[in-house]
Image (cartoon, rainbow, N blue to C red):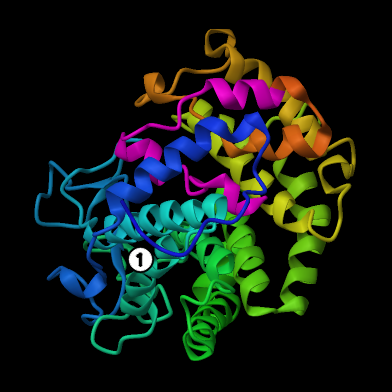
């Protein structure tokens, strides 16, 4: 049991959050003594970068049976288990640890939880011997083709809950002003790289979930670093580009429906878009109802909700893999349910499981600790 200062009253007294509070407290105990593991703990000989550079490989790329030593070939929706994933899973682990400990602090006020996650933040973003360089130049590489790609920026969606965790504990006393300044500098540098490097410029222009993920990261990192100009940019793009270009009039995401995993990708993009709206709702409480050309987050929820409630009614193709793993406790239900005052969304959010351990689900659920987002 962690011992810290006396708990303060929790702002999450609504019974809606009872299960989630139990979950995060149990996970916080599990992670209480976890030691930091950063990108410096594992190196791939295929990486063109150095020990401090994040490296990953494209999920759906495989050796060519007709040319085993040649460039990889693509199999959409089918993940190659032999690709290098150590850095991605180290980042996911960081997200899980920070999210759990910060959520536990948030619902109890016990500073011991905040103190416990500080070593992880310092190891990843401050300590010169273990920190990650603030760029993704070598992410989503493909053997025989490229040393990195713009779509690799999607890998740092795993830092969303990390930043939300920092925001949750920054006034707890666990972090010094210097620590907070160093963390802000790291994310400001990374956001600048995202916005100016050719990889980032190309990624934000994507008209599917990759573009949405760029803007969600930009929104959350701007929230932490105080980049009001970028936040305004995100809001404009959300209203004028993401909604009208990614969503159909019926509320679906046509480009996600064309994938080999249309159900999982539709859920993923709905969660990402809802995350953007949730961040923007801090200054615009009507963002979930904002409508352009008949498209809105309200319309998107109306389209997918029946299929989250009853997957067997899904009228499109069944996912080639991981069909049985979905749905789970999607943050879109919680964020939209509260913003739109839809009890049915909130009740479904409560009923669905948040205790998932499938690697596919974990990496496609970057908002795993929604209490940090409210």
Residue 374, compared with residue 156, is above or below; it is above
Q: Is residue 24 left or right of residue 146?
A: right
Q: Is residue 301 left or right of residue 125?
A: right
Instruction: Using the rendered image of the protein, determine whether residue 225 is visible from the camera's viewpoint.
Output: yes
Q: Residue 371 in magenta?
A: yes
Q: Is residue 49 left or right of residue 6?
A: left
User: In front here: 83 or 367?
Assistant: 367
Q: Residue 326: percent from the left, percent from the top?
A: 45, 24
Question: In the rendered image, which quarter is residue 128 located in?
Answer: bottom left
Q: Residue furthest left?
A: 69
Q: Residue furthest top?
A: 312
Residue 25, compared with residue 40, is above or below; it is above
Location of mark 1 (residue): 116
Crowding at dot 1, Cα within 10 Å, few <14 / some 14-19 / many 20+, comes out as many
Residue plotted at (46% across, 62% down): 159
Question: In the rendered image, which quarter is residue 339 located in?
Answer: top right
Q: Is residue 90 left or right of residue 28?
A: left
Residue 310, compared with residue 319, is above or below; it is above
Question: In the rendered image, which quarter is residue 181 located in?
Answer: bottom right
Q: Residue 65: percent from the left, percent from the top?
A: 13, 41
Residue 273, compared with residue 194, is above or below; it is above
Magenta-colored span: 345-374
């Amino acid at each position: 049991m962690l011992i810290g200062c006396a708990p303060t009253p929790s702002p999450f007294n609504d019974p809606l959050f009872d299960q989630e509070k139990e979950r995060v407290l149990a996970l916080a105990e599990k992670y209480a003594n976890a030691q930091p593991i950063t990108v410096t703990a594992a190196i791939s000989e295929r990486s063109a970068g150095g020990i401090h550079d994040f490296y990953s490989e494209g999920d759906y790329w495989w050796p060519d049976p007709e040319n085993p030593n040649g460039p990889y070939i693509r199999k959409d929706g089918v993940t190659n288990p032999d690709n290098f994933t150590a850095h991605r899973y180290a980042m996911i682990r960081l997200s899980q640890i920070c999210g759990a400990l910060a959520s536990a602090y948030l619902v109890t006020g016990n500073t011991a939880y905040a103190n416990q996650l500080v070593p992880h933040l310092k190891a990843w973003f401050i300590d010169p011997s273990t920190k990650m360089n603030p760029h993704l130049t070598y992410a989503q590489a493909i053997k025989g083709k490229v040393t990195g790609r713009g779509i690799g920026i999607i890998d740092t969606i795993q830092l969303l809950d990390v930043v939300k965790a920092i925001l949750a504990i920054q006034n707890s006393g666990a972090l010094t002003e210097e620590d907070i300044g160093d963390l802000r500098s790291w994310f400001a540098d990374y956001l600048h790289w995202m916005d100016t490097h050719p990889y980032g410029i190309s990624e934000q222009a994507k008209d599917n979930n990759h573009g949405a993920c760029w803007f969600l990261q930009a929104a959350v990192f701007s929230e932490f670093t105080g980049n009001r100009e970028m936040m305004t940019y995100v809001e404009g793009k959300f209203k004028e580009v993401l909604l009208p270009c990614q969503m159909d009039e019926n509320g679906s995401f046509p480009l996600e429906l064309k994938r080999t995993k249309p159900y999982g990708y539709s859920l993923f993009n709905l969660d990402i878009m809802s995350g953007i709206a949730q961040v923007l709702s801090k200054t615009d409480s009507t963002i979930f109802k904002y409508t352009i050309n008949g498209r809105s987050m309200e319309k998107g929820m109306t389209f997918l909700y029946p299929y989250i409630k009853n997957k067997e009614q899904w009228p499109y193709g069944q996912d080639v893999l991981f069909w049985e793993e979905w749905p789970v406790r999607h943050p879109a239900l919680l964020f939209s349910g509260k913003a739109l005052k839809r009890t049915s969304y909130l009740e479904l959010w409560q009923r669905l499981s948040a205790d998932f351990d499938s690697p596919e689900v974990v990496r496609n659920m970057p908002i795993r600790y929604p209490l940090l987002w409210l």
